[in-house]
């Protein structure tokens, strides 16, 4: 299960880095909460809006590097986990000049097992994600609202 959920988190970051997050809300439950620092977005419509606004800012190169995935709580249909996030990002078209990480954060995810509408196997989705900044490059602009 840990490997599966870690792969889910990695797939979400891939979606954001390579497709601008256009399908990011598909990784979340319909009523999910996504919190960046002190700003919370509720439901897939608001999550879609976050990544639509991010894309509207113009070209951006980002790599969200996830590691140290650790399960904090496990139940049959609920898992809480934390992972470390190192974010390299800069506005513009690739390649961009080498940069230091703009952010190091802890990402707290609550996953729930949900039934598939097509009668397929249940699947894990994110019901809650909270990103807590641990290191933040002064003066750098994140592409999502945090206040």
Image (cartoon, rainbow, N blue to C red):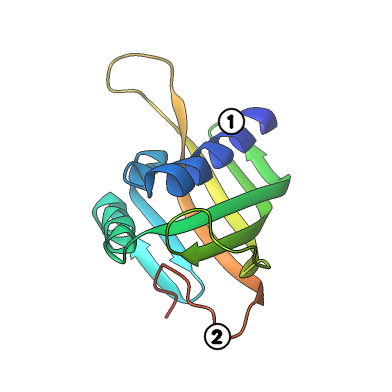
Secondary structure at badge 1 equals loop
Label 2 or label 1, whichever comes before in sequence order: 1
Question: Mark 2 or mark 1: which is in front?
Answer: 2
Residue drawn at (51%, 65%), measured in percent from left and top?
90
Question: Which circle marks residue 139 in the picture?
Answer: 2
Judge by depth and name the residue closer to the eye, 103 or 96.
Answer: 96
Residue 41 appears in which quarter of the rendering?
bottom left
Secondary structure at badge 2 equals loop
State the image coordinates of residue 130 (x, y, percent, origin top left). 53, 62
State the image coordinates of residue 94 (x, y, percent, origin top left). 48, 53
Q: CA distance from mark 2 to mark 1?
A: 43 Å
Residue 101 lies, with reference to residue 81, above or below; the image says: below
Question: Which circle marks residue 121 in the picture?
Answer: none
Judge by depth and name the residue closer to the eye, 98 or 88.
Answer: 98
Q: Is residue 29 visible?
A: no
Name the residue at the bottom extreme.
139
Residue 99 lies, with reference to residue 107, above or below; the image says: below
State the image coordinates of residue 40 (x, y, percent, origin top left). 39, 68
The residue carrying mark 1 is: 76
Judge by depth and name the residue closer to the eye, 58 or 142.
Answer: 58
Q: Residues within 10 Å of mark 1 (few under 14, many from 20)?
A: few
Judge by depth and name the residue closer to the eye, 28 or 90.
Answer: 90
State the image coordinates of residue 1 (x, y, percent, origin top left). 65, 28
Residue 68 lies, with reference to residue 115, above or below; the image says: below
Q: Residues within 10 Å of mark 2 (few under 14, many from 20)?
A: few
Residue drawn at (58%, 53%), measured in percent from left and top?
64
């Amino acid at each position: 299960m840990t490997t599966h959920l870690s792969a889910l988190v990695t797939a979400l970051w891939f979606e954001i880095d390579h497709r601008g997050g256009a399908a990011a809300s598909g990784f979340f439950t319909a009523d999910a909460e996504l919190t960046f620092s002190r700003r919370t977005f509720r439901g897939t419509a608001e999550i879609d809006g976050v990544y639509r606004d991010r894309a509207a800012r113009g070209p951006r190169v980002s790599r969200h590097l996830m590691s140290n995935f650790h399960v904090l709580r496990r139940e049959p249909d609920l898992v809480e986990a934390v992972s470390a996030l190192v974010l390299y990002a800069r506005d513009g078209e690739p390649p961009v000049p080498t940069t230091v990480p703009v952010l190091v954060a802890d990402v707290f995810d609550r996953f729930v097992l949900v039934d598939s509408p097509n009668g397929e196997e249940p699947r894990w989705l994110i019901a809650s994600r909270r990103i807590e900044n641990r290191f933040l490059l002064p003066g750098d602009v994140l592409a999502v609202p945090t206040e």
